[in-house]
Image (spheres, rainbow, N blue to C red):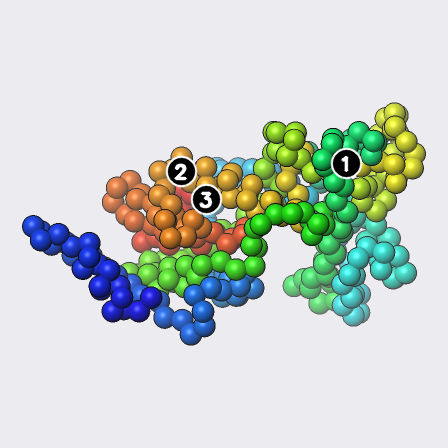
Amino acid sequence: MSARAVVDYLNTLRHIQHSVHITCILARHIASSRTSLAGYRVLFNQTRLRNEPIATPPNTSTPTTFVPVGCKVISSPICPDTPKHFGQTINTPFASDWLDVLFQNYSEMLTTGTFSAPMLCSQLPPGKSILRPRIACHVEETSTPHQYDLYARTCADGSTQQEYIDFTDSIDSIRVLLNIAASSGLTIRILDVSNAFQNSIIFDATERVYISLPPLFLEWFKHQWPDFPLPSQNPKDLILQCLKTIQGTQDAGRRWYILLSGCLFELKMVRSSMDHGVFIWSFNGVETCYLALATDDILFLSKTRAPFLTLH
């Protein structure tokens, strides 16, 4: 929308009896009116470089956070290659380390209550399909030379789900908010939510998804519960019911949004009618704050620090 179009639209809203002064901030962009999630990630990372650390008040304990991602630090003269799938870790010098990371991932998912106990494929409810599991591996450099973090996360392959949801594009509102912050002298802060897509409990059993047993899951399960009466010893006969949303399913983002937006509404935030990922907050009636969502990242704009500490 051009600046002239904005003025014309505002003139249609003007009443003859009185006049109101409002501030309009327009953000210019070169491409189309939409931006990719990759572009959003770059914007967040650039903003995060300027984000000051959060000071923890004295005598305040930090709550324990469980993130269902296995992680292990290894030493190597060269950076290990990131496996495309877990099978590629078997013939590497770090095969045992990757196995430790995988089992740690399963233990973390047990702690967060993501999966049910193994059940027979014949128990699959009518109309349900079995999704394939995917182990997402990642190698990341640490601040110490020649030391690397190995990460593993269990995901579901939701490519076969028939959902008419677009996860690629989103309305370009973050650039607008950055312009608002620059013109209004607002401070930009970032919140990165850990384990966002596995925070939502699926209470309705009819909406839960089912996946095949991930690699070596049965071995890990037997080690954890050697006396548990498994219905079968063959991994191909067993499936898992996902009691929570799991990354990779096409409705995981929607469920996460429903959960988070409900919390924001409780704080009396108002959702933008143009972009449902943007919320406006009148903090204590004296300060206007802005919040934007992009997957598991939250961009927060405020004049003072008090609203951000309340939100955090």
Q: Residue furthest left?
A: 17
Asked whether the viewer can see residue 116, the reply is no
Please give the name of the residue rendered at 86% of the width and 53% of the height, measured from the top-left corner.
Answer: 96
Tell me residue 198's x, y (percent). 62, 41
| Badge 3 element | loop
**Kind of residue at badge 1:** Leu
The circle on residue 240 is 1
Q: How would you rate the neighbour count of disc 3 (Cα within 10 Å): few for under 14, some for 14-19, many for 20 or more?
A: few
How many numbered badges does the structure rendering display? 3
- The residue nearer to you, when weighing 150 against 158, is 158
Could you say which quadrant of the image residue 187 lies in?
Answer: bottom left
Say which residue appears at 78% left-offset and 66% top-offset: 81
Reading the image, the residue beneath label 3 is 312
Q: What residue type is labelled 3?
A: His
Residue beneath disc 2 = 265
At 80% from the left and 29% from the top, the residue drawn is 123
- The CA span between labels 1 and 2 is 34 Å
Residue 34: tell me if it is visible: yes
Check residue 181 in the rendering and tell me which mark sits there, or answer none.
none
